[in-house]
Amino acid sequence: MDQALIERLENSFNLLAPRGPELVDRFYAHLFSKNPGVRPMFPEEMSGQKKKLLASLVLVMQNIRKPEKLQQPLIEMGRRHVGYGTKPEHYPIVRDTLVQVMSEMAGDQWADQLTEDWNAALNVVAGIMIEGHKLEEKQSQTQTAS
Ligand code: HEM
């Protein structure tokens, strides 16, 4: 990712980070209203999950200039998501929901370029998580076969 892109991601995230709890509240409200089918995958009580999602976004942004530090944690996170019933096709839904909510919250401070930027960044995150997803599936198939 080039320097200008990283700066745009950092600036837009820094703008919204103080409103992190509102961001994740809105994210899940949006996700579940548009995709009611995924609601049963999540616990009834969402406060812990909201904090974990926010912490993972903060972790990604804190390490965006050292992406090698993100590789392993994101692979592991993708592996764990297999157990939650997540499918690779869910990732674009989560990406689009997050971008939508961030743009709504940022209001006038948002620009179309940021939609492109965040889609690109979240595609990288999802791509690594899906790598983990595939590794996990492969491993569980091998275990079943042996
Ligand atoms: C950008 C992509 C995503 C990020 C950063 C993310 C982040 C997280 C984090 C940090 C957790 C806490 C547990 C853990 O670390 O293993 C979690 C749990 C979970 N995520 Fe994701 N996630 C992403 C994509 C998805 C997608 C696409 C789905 C599918 C709908 C999903 C569904 C879930 C579910 C069901 C749980 C478990 C809730 C529970 O049983 O406690 N996530 N996610």
Image (cartoon, rainbow, N blue to C red):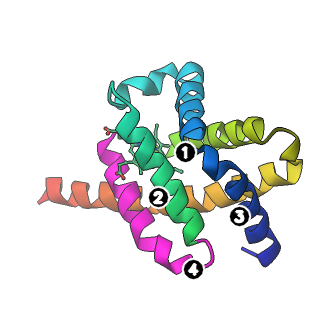
Q: Nearer the viewer, residue 122 or 53?
A: 53
Distance CA(mark 1)–CA(mark 4): 23 Å
Name the amino acid type tagged 2.
Answer: Met
Picture quarter with the N terminus: bottom right
Choose between 18 and 102: the one closer to the eye: 18
Bin the neighbour count of mark 2 within 10 Å (Cα to Cα): few under 14, some 14-19, many 20 and up: many
Using residue 8 as the reference point, say whether residue 56 is left or right of it: left
Nearest to viewer (mark 1 / mark 4): 4
Residue at 52% x, 39% y is 90
State yes or no: residue 67 in magenta.
Answer: yes
Q: CA distance from mark 4 to mark 3?
A: 13 Å
Describe the element under mark 2 as helix, strand or loop. helix
Mark 1 vs mark 2: which is more N-terminal?
1
Magenta residues, start to end: 64-86
Between 123 and 2, which is closer to the camera in this rendering? 2
Please give the residue where the numbered disc 2 appears in the rendered image: 129
The residues tagged by marks 1 and 3 sit, at their Cα atoms, a distance apart of 22 Å
Whole-number angstrom distance, CA of label 2 to CA of label 4: 17 Å
Viewer-nearest of discs 3 and 2: 3
Q: Nearer the viewer, mark 2 or mark 4?
A: 4
Secondary structure mostly seen in the magenta stretch = helix
Circle 4 crowding by C-alpha within 10 Å: few under 14, some 14–19, many from 20: few
Q: Amino acid at mark 3?
A: Glu
Return the mark for residue 71.
none
Q: Earlier in the sequence, mark 2 or mark 4?
A: 4
Q: Earlier in the sequence, mark 1 or mark 3?
A: 3
Q: Amino acid at mark 1?
A: Tyr
Q: Report the residue marked by disc 3.
A: 10
Q: Which residue is mark 1?
A: 91
Q: Position of residue 6 (x, y in %)?
A: 73, 70
Residue carrying label 4: 66
Quarter the C terminus occupies:
bottom left
